[in-house]
């Protein structure tokens, strides 16, 4: 059974940092591209970042470039999202997802989703 379980969300002040984790079970990271979406109240879901299984190439939304870093630990079957210089606009539920690289680039459907972890940036 495929499972993606996120953790690491919470309340942080503007300018602060958080690291989200996504532990994957039921498949190995080298078979999929893994990444993160987010959705804030009243907003559409936004693709934030993903990392390719084949060559570790990465994608970042313009809104997070230079502030967020995605990485993966194959031995731990875990993907991370390091978030720095957080802004109130980063407040959202962050979802981990797995899919093919084509699906990530072309905004096709993902194969698997986590249940999300809430990040709140507020003073």
Image: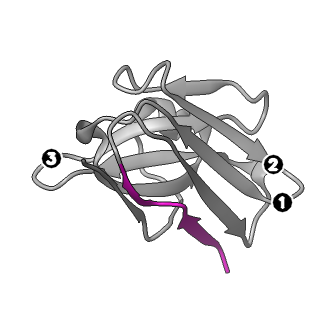
The percent position of residue 116, horizontal first and vertical second, equals: 42, 65
Residue at 84 percent of width and 51 percent of height: 74
Left or right: residue 94 compared with residue 2: left
Q: How is the image coloured?
A: one colour
Against 51, residue 11 (above or below) is below
**Residue under label 3:** 43
**Residue under label 1:** 76
The percent position of residue 88, horizontal first and vertical second, equals: 24, 40
Mark 2 / mark 3, whichever is N-terminal: 3
Q: Label 3's element?
A: loop
Q: Decide: few, some or many residues near mark 3? Use Cα within 10 Å; few <14, some 14-19, many ≥20.
A: few
Magenta-colored stretch includes residue 7? yes
The percent position of residue 32, horizontal first and vertical second, equals: 69, 48
Q: Who is closer to the viewer here, 22 or 1? A: 22
**Residue under label 2:** 73
Q: Who is closer to the viewer here, 36 or 109? A: 36
Label 3 – label 1 distance at C-alpha:
33 Å
Q: Label 1's element?
A: loop
Assess whether mark 2 and mark 1 are in contact (beta carbons under 8 angstroms).
yes
Label 1 – label 2 distance at C-alpha:
5 Å
Q: Which residues are magenta?
A: 1-12
Label 2 – label 3 distance at C-alpha:
31 Å
């Amino acid at each position: 059974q495929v499972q993606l379980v996120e953790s690491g969300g919470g309340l942080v002040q503007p300018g602060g940092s958080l690291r989200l984790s996504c532990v994957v079970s039921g498949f190995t990271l080298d078979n999929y591209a893994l990444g993160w979406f987010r959705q804030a109240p009243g907003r559409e879901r936004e693709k934030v970042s993903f990392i390719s299984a084949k060559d570790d190439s990465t994608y970042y939304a313009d809104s997070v470039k230079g502030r967020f870093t995605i990485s993966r630990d194959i031995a731990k079957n875990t993907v991370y999202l390091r978030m720095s210089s957080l802004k109130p606009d980063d407040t959202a539920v962050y979802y981990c997802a797995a899919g093919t690289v084509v699906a990530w680039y072309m905004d096709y459907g993902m194969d698997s989703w986590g249940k999300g972890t809430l990040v709140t940036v507020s003073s």
